[in-house]
Image (cartoon, rainbow, N blue to C red):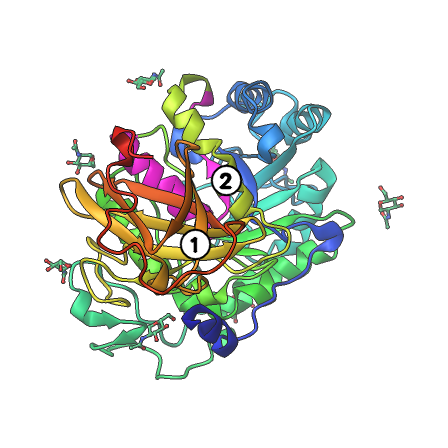
Amino acid sequence: MAAYLLLALAPTALGLEAPGGIGRLPAMGWNSWNAYHCDIDESKFLTAAKAMVSMGFYDLGYQYVNIDDCWQIKDRRDNVTGKLIPDTSKFSDGISGLANTVHDMGLKIGIYSSAGTLTCAGYEASIDHEEIDAATFAEWGIDFLKYDNCNIPSNWTDECSACTPDNSDSSLYVNGTCKDTTGQCPQGYDYSKSLTFERYKKMGDALAKQNRTILYNLCEWGTAEVWTWGAQVAQAWRSTGDISPDWSRIIQIINENSFYNNYADFYAHNDPDMLEVGNGNLTEAESRTHFAIWAIEKAPLIMGTDLTNLSQTNIDILQNKHLIAFNQDPVVSSPAQPYKGGVNPLWTFNATNPAEYWSGESSKGTIVAMMNTLGSTRTMRANWAEVPSLKGNGRYRVRDVWTERDLGCVSGGVSREVESHDTAVLLVTGGCGGQIGHGWGWGHGWGWGWKHGGW
Ligand SMILES: *[C@@H]1O[C@H](CO)[C@@H](O)[C@H](O)[C@H]1NC(C)=O
Ligand SMILES: *[C@@H]1O[C@H](CO)[C@@H](O)[C@H](O)[C@H]1NC(C)=O
Ligand SMILES: *[C@@H]1O[C@H](CO)[C@@H](O)[C@H](O)[C@H]1NC(C)=O
Ligand SMILES: *[C@@H]1O[C@H](CO)[C@@H](O)[C@H](O)[C@H]1NC(C)=O
Ligand SMILES: *[C@@H]1O[C@H](CO)[C@@H](O)[C@H](O)[C@H]1NC(C)=O
Ligand SMILES: *[C@@H]1O[C@H](CO)[C@@H](O)[C@H](O)[C@H]1NC(C)=O
Ligand SMILES: *[C@@H]1O[C@H](CO)[C@@H](O)[C@H](O)[C@H]1NC(C)=O
């Protein structure tokens, strides 16, 4: 029952409710950055939008087509209206023209700005222009804003900073406590008093005044302990620094974000950054882990690759219906949590070998995930007795979430061979009749060798 206990002790974090249920569940969609960075134009968004519909992503819940940085002309606003100016060499009908087309396809559209003077790529940004920019986005038909953290004016610098996870020296960061406290805010500091909070709240207030619901996704890189106040300002917040399409970064992010799951709720989503499935040199195993952990932590599922060039394996990963169902559960708001460390003790901050054993409840059953952070295949075992929501002594029906294989009714637990950097994911449900004695099935090889037809 440890998971219930943690939740009971956690701060109540039900997020900022947006009208019409917008943002209640993690957003699903596509964004241009991880695929194209600044090299964008309307054809890339139309291609992504068409692919989302024709490839079946839309039917599974992916609906946002999000424009990232570099959509404007540089160095000026409209000197009459004060509005941001779309680059019509990239967007021939402006942003509103693209928005109309995207809406006609049944999809939604997102845009990007920064809570600073310029965006990260050096385009005009929104600090001290929140009202006009929010009104402009609403007028264009925008449904989603990603709000970045570049080029902060000096008078907006926080008086002190939060402990930043140091992935190279984990001894500096133990569960949010810094060893080196130089420049750090004192223990117990209320980060909703920070100027960072203020910068992000200003845009939230401006969006709330518009006659249009715009989902608000903070992108302040997990500074100022945003998970403690993000839900007062927005429906989602970036909880870490930027992702890159390689295992070493993805596993660092999994480590960091694993400490913040108590703060997530409906309308309140940690965002460990957008998906890299299809990019870089991720193996199939690494892509499965990336998607599975994002899905069960109830992160926004925003794809960021050329959808038309995805391998069938990657399509299947991004379209896994059990993981999407967990992520989008309309009834249960809590994400999965690590229940056992594995290589390291539970709650060890470790950027290469974070917690490996995870579980979470959903209206369709309990999800159990076993992530192998080591460099070679090993046998991992899900013991029902260790999984907080299972009673330990029951028989449970088990389905392999990747292969759809029904493993039947299993007591004791399930052992699986898990490839290096892969994650085995099981959906565990009831429906197996009576309870049997605790520990029954131990040592009988239950679950062993399923790959070889053992079931
Ligand atoms: C407004 O911007 C346009 C385009 O750059 C420029 O030609 C014009 O002189 C500017 N007007 C004012 C009043 O600055
Ligand atoms: C920083 O300076 C700008 C421009 O003078 C001003 O609008 C803004 O309110 C200042 N910010 C703070 C936090 O004082
Ligand atoms: C570390 O954080 C986790 C998750 O918030 C919590 O359950 C655990 O008790 C913490 N451990 C310590 C030593 O503070
Ligand atoms: C808000 O939008 C609705 C529906 O589009 C419209 O009927 C209404 O007039 C708008 N109100 C304002 C104040 O613009
Ligand atoms: C994958 O890419 C990262 C970043 O470019 C690099 O550090 C790593 O060595 C690469 N791994 C493999 C197996 O090529
Ligand atoms: C398509 O994907 C393959 C790997 O699956 C990659 O090697 C190739 O560069 C991609 N092509 C484009 C145009 O992105
Ligand atoms: C992370 O954990 C592994 C396995 O226990 C250990 O070898 C490594 O030194 C740890 N990394 C750090 C930075 O402590």
Q: Is 437 situated above or below 30? A: below
In the rendered view, does 451 fall on the left or right side of 399?
A: left
Q: Is 331 situated above or below 408? A: below
**Which numbered tag is attached to residue 395?**
1
Name which residue lies at 24% across and 79% down: 181
Q: Estimate the spatial distance between the alpha carbons at disc 1 and disc 2, rounded to whole Å.
A: 21 Å
Mark 2 CB near ligand 6 (8 Å cut): no
Q: Ligand 6 is found in which quarter of the picture?
A: top left
**Which numbered tag is attached to residue 322?**
2
Q: Quadrant of the N terminus?
A: bottom left
Nearer to me, 157 or 46: 46
Q: Which percent across, then down, holds residue 167?
A: 21, 58
Residue 95 image-quadrant placement: top right
Name which residue lies at 54% across and 51% down: 217
Q: Which residues are magenta?
A: 280-307
Q: Residues within 10 Å of mark 2 (few under 14, many from 20)?
A: many
Secondary structure at badge 2 equals helix
